[in-house]
Each structure stands twice: as structure tokens, then as C-alpha cells.
């Protein structure tokens, strides 16, 4: 059974999310503060984390940062913060998605299913994708090598890069990339793509400030070039 860790300091919200996820067939564990979240995370090894950004003892962004250092488990941010900067900060730490309070419990279930599908989608294709002479993506194993070295990507980052790698040179709009990796028909956030691209560039580019592989097409979107121009 898929295990989901729900982290929030509001008991009513925890109960609501837990009840809906359990009805949907998930195994749910909970934590009420940042320190408890990291201890539960290390002990239980969840398949996905729903993480409130505003937590006592240890801020949710610090918790997300620590979880990312430990591995690539999918993270959905849960927050009352409406400011764009907060959402971008979480996404740039490697969060896969976000939900803003107040929210529908059904939306939470849909987002969880979508992020898990995203994490599993690449493994359905047993193939190797090469981009130029230096980048190799192993879809079945969700592994990327650049210049012979392994590059750790989150599930969302990998799926985004793989989608572009299958059509190198094609220019994708942000909306097209959201459709490719989001997988659920709810209001989306195109700046999320910018945050994921920034993360990918930090990992695959020699100089992320002057990217040669994952290029911006101003006013349109992004493309992954076949070779380094």
C-alpha cells in the first residue's frame, strides 16, 4: 500500500486529509511539526509527502530541504501563503507540486494520484534516450547521465527533461510542459515550470547562468538542444 506522510500543525486539516486519503486506499502517517516530520520521514520511508510550509520548531522549507538531501521522494507543498515567491521557493527546493489553503480534500487526493503517476510514468517506457553526445536518459530506471556522470533528478524534473529529450530542438511552451508533467485538470501555475527548469539547469549545465543544453526561447518557452550550440 502506498504510504503518504501528512505534515501540518492544524489537527483538523490533518484529519481531513488523512480521512480522504485512507478512503482512497492510501496508508497515511502524520506529523505536527518540522522536527517530528523529519524523524517520521527517516523512520517510515513514505512514498510521498504532503508538507505544510508554516510549521512550528522547524520551517516547512527547511524540512523540504532536508528531505531533498535524503532522496527524491515526491513532495506536495500545502500552504496558506499566497505570495508567488513562497511557491517558487518551495518548487526550487525540489517540491513536485503545491496546494494553497483553503483547498478541496478531493483536490488533495487528485494531486497525490497525479504526482505518483508522474513518478511512475517514465518507468513504463523501457528505452534509452540520447541527446547529443553527452546526455543519456534511462526511462525505465529514471536515471540521467551527463558526460558519464549520474545526475540526480526528482520525478517531476526527470519527466520534464524526458518529455523534451524525446523531441530535441522542439520549442515547448510552459503550458505544454505543464500538460506533460502535471497530469490533473486543476488550475496550474506556469511559473512552476520556470522553477523546475532552474533546478534542472543547476544539475545538467556546466554554467547554469549561461545554459547550452536547456535553452530559453524568449516569449515562448524552452527547448532541449541536440548537442551543445
Image (tube, rainbow, N blue to C red):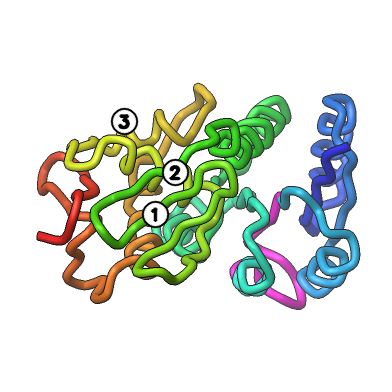
Helix, strand or loop at label 1? It is: strand
Q: Which mark is residue 136?
A: 1
What is the span of residues highlighted in magenta in the rendered image?
50-61
Does the residue at mark 1 contact the one at mark 2 (Cβ under 8 Å)? yes
In this view, 179 is above or below 206: above
**Going 87% across and 50% down the picture, which residue do you hit?**
11
- Foreground pick, 175 / 70: 70
**Going 54% across and 38% down the picture, which residue do you hit?**
122
Assess whether residue 75 is covered by the magenta stretch: no
Q: Where is residue 162? Give x, y as percent.
A: 40, 43
Q: Residues within 10 Å of mark 1 (few under 14, many from 20)?
A: many
In this view, 90 is above or below 182: below
- Give the residue pinned by disc 2: 128
Q: CA distance from mark 1 to mark 3?
A: 23 Å
- Foreground pick, 180 / 18: 180
- Foreground pick, 148 / 222: 148
Does the residue at mark 1 contact the one at mark 3 (Cβ under 8 Å)? no
Q: CA distance from mark 1 to mark 2?
A: 7 Å
Assess whether residue 56 is covered by the magenta stretch: yes
Q: Residues within 10 Å of mark 2 (few under 14, many from 20)?
A: some
- Give the residue pinned by disc 3: 176
Amino acid at each position: 500500500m502506498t504510504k503518504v506522510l501528512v505534515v501540518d500543525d492544524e489537527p483538523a486539516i490533518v484529519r481531513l486529509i488523512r480521512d480522504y486519503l485512507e478512503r482512497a486506499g492510501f496508508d497515511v502517517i502524520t506529523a505536527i511539526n518540522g522536527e517530528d516530520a523529519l524523524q517520521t520521514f527517516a523512520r517510515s520511508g513514505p512514498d510521498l509527502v504532503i508538507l505544510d510550509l508554516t510549521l512550528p520548531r522547524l520551517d516547512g522549507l527547511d524540512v523540504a530541504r532536508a528531505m531533498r538531501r535524503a532522496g527524491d521522494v515526491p513532495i506536495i507543498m500545502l500552504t496558506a501563503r499566497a505570495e508567488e515567491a513562497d511557491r517558487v521557493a518551495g518548487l526550487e527546493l525540489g517540491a513536485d507540486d503545491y496546494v494553497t489553503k483553503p483547498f478541496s480534500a478531493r483536490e488533495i487526493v487528485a494531486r497525490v494520484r497525479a504526482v505518483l503517476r508522474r513518478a511512475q510514468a517514465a518507468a513504463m517506457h523501457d528505452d534509452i534516450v540520447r541527446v547529443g553526445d553527452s546526455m543519456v536518459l534511462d526511462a525505465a530506471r529514471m536515471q540521467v547521465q551527463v558526460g558519464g556522470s549520474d545526475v540526480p533528478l526528482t520525478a517531476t524534473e526527470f519527466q520534464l527533461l524526458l518529455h523534451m529529450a524525446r523531441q530535441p530542438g522542439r520549442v515547448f511552451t510552459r503550458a505544454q510542459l505543464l500538460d506533460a508533467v502535471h497530469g490533473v485538470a486543476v488550475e496550474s501555475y506556469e511559473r512552476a515550470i520556470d522553477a523546475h527548469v532552474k533546478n534542472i539547469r543547476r544539475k545538467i549545465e556546466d554554467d547554469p547562468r549561461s545554459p547550452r543544453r536547456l535553452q530559453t526561447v524568449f516569449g515562448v518557452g524552452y527547448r532541449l538542444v541536440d548537442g551543445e550550440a
